[in-house]
């Protein structure tokens, strides 16, 4: 599996903190804060780098359990990374039981497109 060199230098801004780790063969991107137009680009870079380190069929997990806001630009990032993951024969699994993430996903009608999981463990095992 490729090295996660970017994990040594996590993305950290006042509004967003992103850290990447591995659990077994699965790459997990833990996100804390707000995902909006000003932070979406940095998150997309981190997710794309993590996806490059992901070996199919193992999933890439975006842990958004500590995200307090996600705007349309954040949803667009998740959709794009999910599309690329599918093309590469893997999945993007999104963790969040928080209303701050679930409500925008549901309002946009994306609950059938994005794989949402209530816990990190359910995302790792692929159960809803």
Image: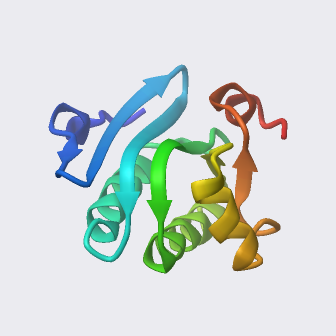
Q: Is residue 122 left or right of residue 51?
A: right
In percent of the image, x 46 and y 52: which residue is there? 68
Residue that protrudes farthest toward the top in the picture: 24
In percent of the image, x 68 and y 43: which residue is there? 97
Q: Nearer the viewer, residue 118 or 87?
A: 118
Q: Is residue 15 left or right of residue 78?
A: left
Q: Residue 1 at x, y = what percent?
A: 43, 32
In percent of the image, x 54 and y 72: which residue is there? 75
Q: Residue 30 at x, y = what percent?
A: 43, 38
Task: Quarter of the image for the C terminus: give it.
Answer: top right
Q: Residue 115 at x, y = what percent?
A: 73, 55
Q: Nearer the viewer, residue 18 or 21?
A: 18
Q: Nearer the viewer, residue 79 or 110?
A: 110
In percent of the image, x 77 and y 77: which residue is there? 109
Q: Residue 69 at x, y = what percent?
A: 46, 60
Q: Is residue 54 left or right of residue 58?
A: left
Q: Quadrant of residue 79?
A: bottom right
Q: Is residue 32 above or below residue 1?
A: below
Tag count: 0
Q: Is residue 42 above or below residue 117?
A: below
Model colouring: rainbow
Q: Quadrant of residue 84?
A: bottom right
Q: Is residue 59 above or below residue 71?
A: above
Q: Nearer the viewer, residue 90 or 119?
A: 119
């Amino acid at each position: 599996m490729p090295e996660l060199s970017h994990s040594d230098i996590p993305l950290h801004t006042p509004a967003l903190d992103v850290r990447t780790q591995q659990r077994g063969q699965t790459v997990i991107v833990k996100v804390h804060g707000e995902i909006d137009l000003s932070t979406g680009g940095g998150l997309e870079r981190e997710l794309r780098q993590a996806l490059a380190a992901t070996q199919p069929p193992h999933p890439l997990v975006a842990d958004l359990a500590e995200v307090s806001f996600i705007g349309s630009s954040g949803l667009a990032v998740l959709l794009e990374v999910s599309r690329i993951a599918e093309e590469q024969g893997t999945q993007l699994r999104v963790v969040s039981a928080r209303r701050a993430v679930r409500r925008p996903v549901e309002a946009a009608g994306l609950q059938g497109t994005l794989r949402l999981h209530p816990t990190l463990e359910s995302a790792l095992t692929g159960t809803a």
